[in-house]
Image (tube, helix red, strand yellow):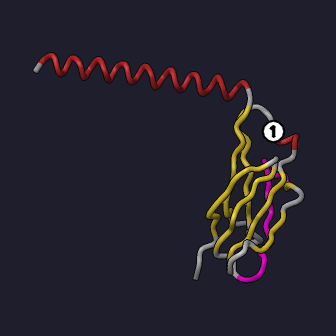
Amino acid sequence: MSITHFITSQIISGVWEGTLAGAGTNAPALTASHEGRTLEGVTVSAGGADGLWLVQVPIPAELISDGVQTVLIKDQAEDTLGSFAILAGQVLAQDLRAEIALLRAELDMLKQSFRQHCNEN
């Protein structure tokens, strides 16, 4: 028995595309949702090889806002097969700057400890 999973994914012109493997010979019925709200326009078409399906999820403009927005892709049994996230906005930039500053401080601490250790020997 094969396991259903996405083997590729990308976002092109506001549409997320993924290649689904292991779903069998009949097109799977899939849904996409964001914060519990079902997204419209999900399509599933033959992916060119047996058992491969091209899944497309249009990304609505109202979904794009500051922070991290996650879309879940589920089958009829409500099992999550995949997801994608969109990261945007000023809040994200501030989070990344804070994280980089923390990493730099930790690196400086490690460098200082390493130099002290080398000088002691």
Q: Is residue 97 magenta?
A: no
Q: Give, as a single range, the part of the protein colored magenta.
A: 25-37
Q: Provide residue 87's location: percent of width, then percent of height.
A: 70, 37
Kindly report the secondary structure that dominates the magenta region of the rendered protein.
Answer: loop
* Of the pair 117 and 7, the residue shown nearer to us: 7
Task: Please name the amino acid that badge 1 sits on.
Answer: Ile
Q: Provide residue 3's location: percent of width, then percent of height.
A: 59, 74
Q: Is residue 29 magenta?
A: yes
Number of residues whose C-alpha sits closer than 10 Å to that of mark 1, classed few (under 14), some (14–19) or many (20 or more) = some
Q: Provide residue 46's location: percent of width, then percent of height.
A: 77, 74
x 70%, y 53%: residue? 10
- Whether 79 is drawn above or below 13: the answer is below
- The C terminus, quarter of image: top left
x 76%, y 64%: residue? 55
Determine which residue is flagged by label 1.
64
- Whether 60 is drawn above or below 66: the answer is below
| Residue 23 figure quarter | bottom right
- Whether 29 is drawn above or below 32: the answer is below
- Whether 5 is drawn above or below 106: the answer is below
Q: Provide residue 103's location: percent of width, then percent of height.
A: 46, 25
